[in-house]
Image (spheres, grey):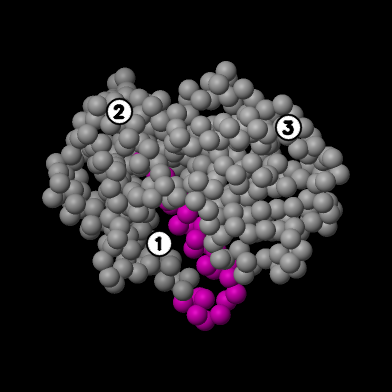
Amino acid sequence: MRILLVSHPALVAELGASQVALSLAAALRARGHDARAWSPEPLPAGSRWWNLWLRQRQAIERFAAAEGPFDVIDTPAISASRKLAHSGSIVVRSVQPELRYLFRGIRDDFSRHPSPRAVAHAVAHTALGSAQGGAILAGWRRARLILCLGSAELAWMRRRFPRWAPKLGLYFNTLPAEERVALADVRRGRRSAPADTGRGVSFLWMGRWTPHKGTRRLREFVRERLAARPCDSFTLAGCGPAAERELPAEWLRSGRVRLVPAYTRAQLPPLLAAHQAGLFTSEVEGWGLNLNEMLESGMPVFATEAGGMSDLKRYFPSSLRPFPPPAEVDARPPEDIEANGYIATFSWPGIARSYERQLLGREGGERL
């Protein structure tokens, strides 16, 4: 099959949505398909926050018309336009819960200090969100197959949109094979899970500094932990410049809270190796690949019930624990992820096989 996999962000490995498209395209090519990951970036001059989604949609339509037809066009729902459907069968594969992100963003806008400027900004975002929400719903309606990222999102879609249940499918996210090898080395080199040695626990949190990642929850936990456990420390990685503006300056001056605004994929293994426990605080999440990264590196992770948590916890009954951490972080032996089926389930060759089966139609379903 000739398959176009669209990524809104530029195709660089540091961006989660791009990494998924690149990895899935490579795995599908290994299965004999003509699969191409493509991004509309860079967008033309004049692209702004309010017209970004329209510029992306138009660029995708032009590319598909020029390079098509395709057997399958795999795209985020907001870009699954009627015009795009002329160039191939539409598959909507989510990389984030688009509607819930929209609702959360609007709620956050109205919860800020109610200055006239802030209210005007919130009203504008609400109007834009209504248009974007309509486009997402139209994309789901137009799609021949809707692939949900993880069981939690699949369950949410089944509850909210039961009429689309026959065309709902499921896929997982995971790490590229080369990164998995590097994290296996970190796992082998890790002596043990953290225990109360008197030296404290070094916690690692990774992600963009945005409200749906649970940044308020994280700040509250760090504040309480710094007071209660003087030897514990925290690193917040990938948080950009925004975290420094929101965190108390004394936390950073003390050295107990360290910021790593950005890191490369090559810097990930040593970053994981330098910490004893992971934190995952998201309120709304697509998957949260940092869960896989931290768990595969052999550390325990204290996580909220979001993203891929529900799919991963059966493979990590010891290491994947509820957030927040208890006062004492006990040492437990890590799971054997080769023996328990994790590696077989969460691999790009396996994900590509499942993707292919769903494209060709499940029993009683319609072939694409």
For residue 71, which quarter of the picture? top left
Residue 296 x, y percent position in the rendering: 58, 33
Q: Which mark is residue 192?
A: 3
SS of the residue under disc 2: helix
Q: What is the span of residues highlighted in magenta in the rendered image?
A: 93-120
Residue 97 x, y percent position in the rendering: 45, 47
Residue 8 x, y percent position in the rendering: 34, 53
**Camera sees residue 66:** yes
Q: Quickly name the residue at label 2.
A: 30
Label 3, label 2: how many angstroms apart (C-alpha)? 37 Å
Compared across the picture, whether 342 is left or right of 177 comes to: right
Q: Amino acid at mark 3?
A: Ser
Q: Earlier in the sequence, mark 3 or mark 1?
A: 1
Q: Quickly name the residue at label 1.
A: 129
Q: Nearer the viewer, mark 1 or mark 2?
A: 2
Residue 220 x, y percent position in the rendering: 72, 57
SS of the residue under disc 1: helix
